[in-house]
Image (cartoon, rainbow, N blue to C red):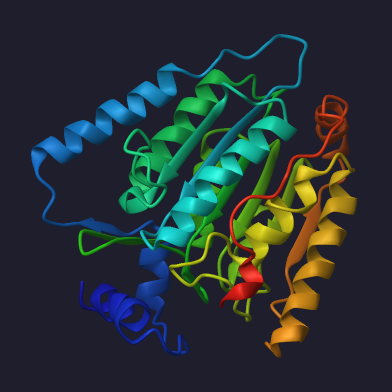
């Protein structure tokens, strides 16, 4: 436990360097260490009902159709992540014909919608398991987007005010997806150092996009923002336009580089991987992509850090 508390302090109290990460901390993150404190029974029951409602509302998969099921999780209660999660779910559901097959989670009600379940690792785990049960794993696709803080070697951070803390380490996220049998997947991770996760998530049928390289921060996560740089460039700009996914990625990455240069920031170096067989499901989904673009929403991420 002392290793866990030290790591919590490194991120959430000092917010400074992450160089000193012990093997025990890395192992804990890769087991998915989480603590919830001060929650009453009514809160837990309310979460159960919200998540059960979201799962029960999912439409069934259609035999012979490559259906996309979308999970978007804001894992930190800083409002920027909740706002990004809520809007990202709308964009991805529309682009990938997943309206009615989408679950959005947001820590601390950062999305400003009391009907959205908490963005906790526990809720994410249940949502992934439920969607795996709904999908035809040989035919359908999971689209997963997470937005939060991150740290080297320990992966994605979960924080819900003073109540919830945790980590989803690189191996933990891979184990959740692989254990559920979800190999056909598009995973997009908006977090500092999120490139750390990429080698664990790749396979022939996967597409993985990260906001930063394994040793770089990403930008735009100030609590008052509506978008991170990554979310604004990829979701709020590039994926709103009816263009192939790889062209959208190139547009988003160019935009992020432009913003970082204009702000004189250390390059985040976002990462992109496509498995050799991923085109089979990606082309099927993109054939049903809406023909018209949608308007951007929120304040531009370039306005803050």
**Relative to 283, 259 lies left or right:** left
Q: Above or below — where is 197 with respect to 287?
A: below
Q: Residue reaching furthest top?
A: 63
Q: Quadrant of the N terminus?
A: bottom left
Q: Quadrant of residue 249?
A: bottom right
Q: Quadrant of the C terminus?
A: bottom right
| Residue 44 percent location from the top left of the image | 19, 38
| Residue 145 percent location from the top left of the image | 59, 48
Of 204 and 56, nearer the camera is 56
**Relative to 256, 76 lies left or right:** left
Residue occupying the point 63% across, 81% down: 215
Of 50 and 272, nearer the camera is 50
**Relative to 39, 164 lies left or right:** right
Q: Is residue 202 visible?
A: no
Q: Above or below — where is 84 with respect to 282?
A: below
Q: Is residue 227 visible?
A: yes
| Residue 24 percent location from the top left of the image | 35, 75
Residue occupying the point 76% across, 15% down: 65
Residue occupying the point 48% across, 62% down: 148
Q: Quadrant of residue 199?
A: bottom right
**Relative to 40, 82 lies left or right:** right
| Residue 6 percent location from the top left of the image | 27, 81
Of 31 and 101, nearer the camera is 101
Q: Above or below — where is 132 with respect to 25?
A: above
Q: Quadrant of residue 164?
A: bottom left
Of 245 and 64, nearer the camera is 245
Q: How many marks?
A: 0
Residue occupying the point 26% across, 30% down: 48
């Amino acid at each position: 436990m002392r290793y866990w508390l030290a790591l919590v302090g490194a991120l959430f109290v000092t917010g400074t360097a992450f160089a000193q990460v012990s093997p025990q901390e890395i192992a804990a993150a890769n087991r998915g260490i989480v603590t919830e404190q001060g929650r009453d029974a009514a809160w837990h029951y309310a979460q159960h009902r919200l998540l059960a409602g979201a799962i029960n509302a999912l439409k069934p998969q259609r035999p012979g159709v490559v259906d996309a099921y979308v999970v978007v999780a804001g894992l930190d209660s800083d409002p920027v992540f909740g706002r990004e999660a809520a809007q990202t779910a709308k964009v991805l559901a529309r682009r990938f014909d997943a309206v009615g097959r989408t679950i959005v989670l947001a820590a601390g009600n950062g999305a400003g919608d009391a009907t959205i379940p908490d963005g906790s690792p526990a809720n994410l785990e249940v949502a992934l398991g439920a969607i795996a049960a709904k999908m035809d794993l040989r035919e359908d696709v999971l689209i997963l987007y997470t937005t939060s803080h991150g740290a080297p070697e320990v992966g994605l951070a979960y924080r819900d005010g003073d109540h919830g803390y945790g980590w989803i380490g690189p191996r933990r996220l891979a184990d959740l997806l692989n254990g559920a049998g979800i190999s056909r997947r598009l995973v997009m991770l908006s977090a500092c150092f999120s490139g750390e996760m990429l080698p664990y998530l790749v396979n022939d049928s996967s597409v993985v996009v990260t906001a930063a390289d394994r040793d770089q921060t990403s930008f735009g996560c100030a609590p008052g923002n509506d978008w991170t740089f990554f979310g604004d460039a990829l979701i709020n700009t590039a994926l709103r336009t009816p263009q192939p996914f790889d062209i959208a990625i190139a547009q988003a990455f160019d935009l992020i580089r432009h913003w970082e240069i204009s702000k004189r920031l250390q390059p985040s170096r976002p990462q992109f991987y496509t498995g050799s067989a991923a085109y089979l499901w990606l082309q099927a989904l993109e054939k049903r992509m809406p023909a018209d673009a949608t308007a951007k929403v929120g304040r531009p991420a370039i306005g803050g850090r």
